[in-house]
Amino acid sequence: KAGVTQTPRYLIKTRGQQVTLSCSPISGHRSVSWYQQTPGQGLQFLFEYFSETQRNKGNFPGRFSGRQFSNSRSEMNVSTLELGDSALYLCASSPKDRVVFGNEQFFGPGTRLTVL
Amino acid sequence: AQRVTQPEKLLSVFKGAPVELKCNYSYSGSPELFWYVQYSRQRLQLLLRHISRESIKGFTADLNKGETSFHLKKPFAQEEDSAMYYCALHPGGATNKLIFGTGTLLAVQP
């Protein structure tokens, strides 16, 4: 099976702009989670979707939003970009809706966002 | 509050030396803990989870509820073990959300 794919891989934006990142999970996976990865903070949970429903949201401002489509593909949007939003954004997919034995999360390569 | 702490940003050892990557957690309840690894230019991937109690690539991790720790150990480090290691906690319930530590970069010198 093809792995989790994320597009674009690299993005450069300026402050105040908005950006949309895309994540295609492994075929058959209905759960998608998003994380922000920075050198100082490690990975921080953004949100999680299962069957088009947002089930959890991390402690991020409302400028960060997301959605999931009927084919399980997910997008996240960041509006009014700030310098501090520069990070690697990772998505992960898994077949089940919760962490149980045998349910592994698979991570994508990430989208590197740079805000100037 | 649910939190994972990895006190070392960088751990440098020589090939053949023992390795211990520290992880402490804060969680009220029975935690489920994981170690993830990210090799250079590769994706983040699961290394091991405490519930399976297995050894992967020579690494083991034991959950110590008294000390709230889940340290990752390997008796003899190899150069190919050089990578970023993240400890993660599952907060329970119907979610795939994981709470990650800030990571430890393991550098194995020849």
Image (cartoon, coloured by chain):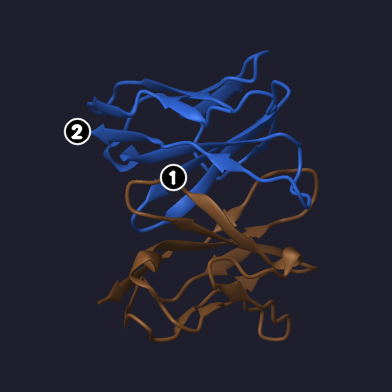
Chain colours: A blue, B brown
Q: Is residue B29 visible?
A: yes
Q: Chain of mark 1?
A: B
Going by the numbered disc 1, the residue's amino acid type is: Arg
Relative to residue A106, is residue B104 depicted above or below? below
Circle 1 Cα neighbour tier, 10 Å, few/some/many (<14 / 14–19 / ≥20): some
Q: Which quadrant of the structure image shows residue A18?
A: top left
Relative to residue A19, is residue B13 depicted above or below? below
Q: Are marks 2 and 1 in contact (CB under 8 Å)?
A: no
Q: Nearer the viewer, residue A13 or A109?
A: A109
Q: Which quadrant of the structure image shows residue B102?
A: bottom left
Q: Please tell me whether mark 1 sits on a helix, a strand or a loop.
A: loop
**Image location (x, y in percent) of residue A29:** 68, 28
Give the residue number, with chain letter if any, for mark 2: A116
> Is residue A41 rendered to the left or right of residue A16?
right
Q: Which quadrant of the structure image shows residue B39?
A: bottom left
Specify the label residue B43 is tagged with: 1
**Image location (x, y in percent) of residue B29:** 80, 68
**Quarter placement of the N terminus of chain B:** bottom right
Q: Chain of mark 2?
A: A
Q: Please tell me whether mark 2 sits on a helix, a strand or a loop.
A: loop
Going by the numbered disc 2, the residue's amino acid type is: Leu
